[in-house]
Image (cartoon, grey):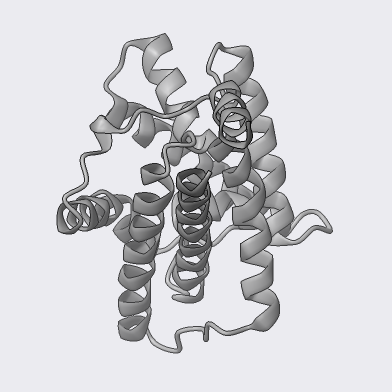
Amino acid sequence: MKKLFVRFFIMITGLFFYALGIIVTIQANIGYAPWDVFHVGIQKNILLSLGAVSIIVGIVIAIIVTLLGEKLGFGTISNIILIGVFVDIILLFNIIPQATNPTFGIIMLITGLFIIALGSYFYIKSAFGVGPRDNLMVVLARRTRLPVGLCRGIIELLVTIFGWVLGGMVGFGTVISVITIGLCVQIVFKIFKFDVTAVKHETLGDTIKTFKKAIS
């Protein structure tokens, strides 16, 4: 039971850092990361919070990937709900100032991307399952037989375009995000000597069985 709760705590920590990183990159004010362009674009057209939009988009994607044969994990569901909740809480307390010049904006953006990378490390390490957007990338790669990196690029290009059309902010920060997020993740994983390919993620059914076994 203790090991299960430690994993749960690690996952929650990761999702909080991920949400914090999102807000830092948005407040950099030099152009949002692709998915944030999409989320903010939608938010500008409906009367919902940014966190609520993130949750709705996550649910829609989770339904799509499930229909296409992917299995969801407890971490997938937690990713959908908690990142959105944490985003709204951080925005509510207004603790992250907005950058007032491009230089400070670049510093904030890179910092935010590293925070997101740190969040990814923690929540992936918990092995409860990956987020719905990552699952979508995997599904596209399997269906099209295209390289995973290319599939990620296609998805991020499409959500950027749709988000921009809806009013999301696209700028040179968007380009920086696309180019450097992979490097930030790689650096963080190397610091922690973390091999993402060695992680065996549980499905939701696996986690339920683990929990039942732990309390029995």
Q: Position of residue 77 (x, y in %)?
A: 63, 38
Residue 157 visible in the displayed image: yes
Residue farthest to the bottom? 100
Residue at the (46%, 50%) spot, across then down: 34
User: Is the residue 96 above or below the residue 204 in the image?
Assistant: below
Q: Position of residue 150 (x, y in %)?
A: 30, 28
Left/right placement of residue 174 relative to residue 89 reads left
Residue 172 visible in the displayed image: no
In terms of depth relative to the viewer, which is nearer, 215 or 162?
A: 215
In terms of depth relative to the viewer, which is nearer, 215 or 21?
A: 215
What is the total number of numbered labels drawn onto the structure image?
Answer: 0
Residue farthest to the right? 47
Residue at the (72%, 59%) spot, across then down: 44
Residue at the (22%, 51%) spot, across then down: 189
Q: Picture quarter containing residue 201?
A: top left
Q: Position of residue 3 (x, y in %)?
A: 45, 46
Left/right placement of residue 62 relative to residue 119 reads right
Quarter in which the C terminus is drawn: top right
Q: Position of residue 84 (x, y in %)?
A: 65, 55
In terms of depth relative to the viewer, which is nearer, 171 or 142?
A: 142
Residue at the (59%, 27%) spot, across then down: 204
User: Is the residue 55 above or below the residue 132 in the image?
Assistant: below
In terms of depth relative to the viewer, which is nearer, 214 or 164?
A: 214
User: Is the residue 90 above or below the residue 141 in the image?
Assistant: below
